[in-house]
Amino acid sequence: MAYGFIYIAVNETMPGLVKIGQTTIAPSERVRQLSQATGVPKPFELYSAYEVESPKESEAEVHKYLAECRCNRTREFFEISPIEAHSILESVLGVVNFMPTVLFSYDQWKAKQNEN
């Protein structure tokens, strides 16, 4: 069985959106890769990551659950706050052996949003 991560990434140039994806490399490295794209004006920040046994299957389950929040069927962006996404991932992935790694609190995230 493949182990990997489901991650939530945020970008201050995309308020109201989160990216929820899967990776088999370190989530911080994946977010760094995403930030290198020429169409990304500012870097993504890793909000949280969850270690899962089957990353592709777990990602598909989460994306299916959040289908109504999805901005584009071919992209992994959802119109939901990171704290709501975190809560939903805990619920949806609750039957899977995972380890949440919240990298900053909701209060810290909210304070950062208010700065902009």
Image: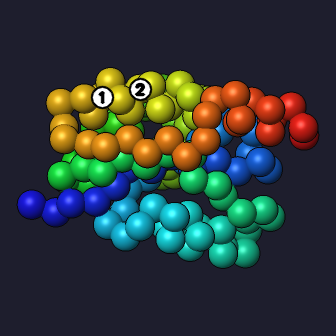
x and y percentages locating residue 94 in the rendered image: 25, 29
Q: Quadrant of residue 101?
A: top left
Q: Label 2 belongs to which residue?
A: 88
Determine crowd level at label 1: few under 14, some 14-19, many 20+ residues with C-alpha closer than 10 A: some
Residue labelled with disc 1: 92
Residue 74 drawn at (x, y percent): 48, 52
Count neighbours of disc 2 (C-alpha within 10 A) and say few if under 14, some if 14 to 19, many if 20 or more: some
State how far apart marks 1 and 2 are (Cα).
6 Å
Which numbered dot is residue 72? none
Residue 15 lies left or right of residue 114; in this view the side is left
What amino acid is found at the position of numbered circle 1 in the picture? Answer: Val
Name the spot of residue 32 as percent of width and height, x first. Answer: 59, 70
- Marks 1 and 2 in Cβ contact (< 8 Å): yes
Task: Decide if residue 54 is on the left or right side of residue 32.
Answer: left
Q: Residue at x 77, y 48 (%)?
A: 12
Callout 1 secondary element:
helix
| Residue at 37% in and 70% down | 25
Q: Quadrant of residue 23?
A: bottom left
| Relative to 74, residue 41 above or below | below
Res. 12 visible in picture: yes
Residue nearest the viewer, comparing 21 with 99: 99
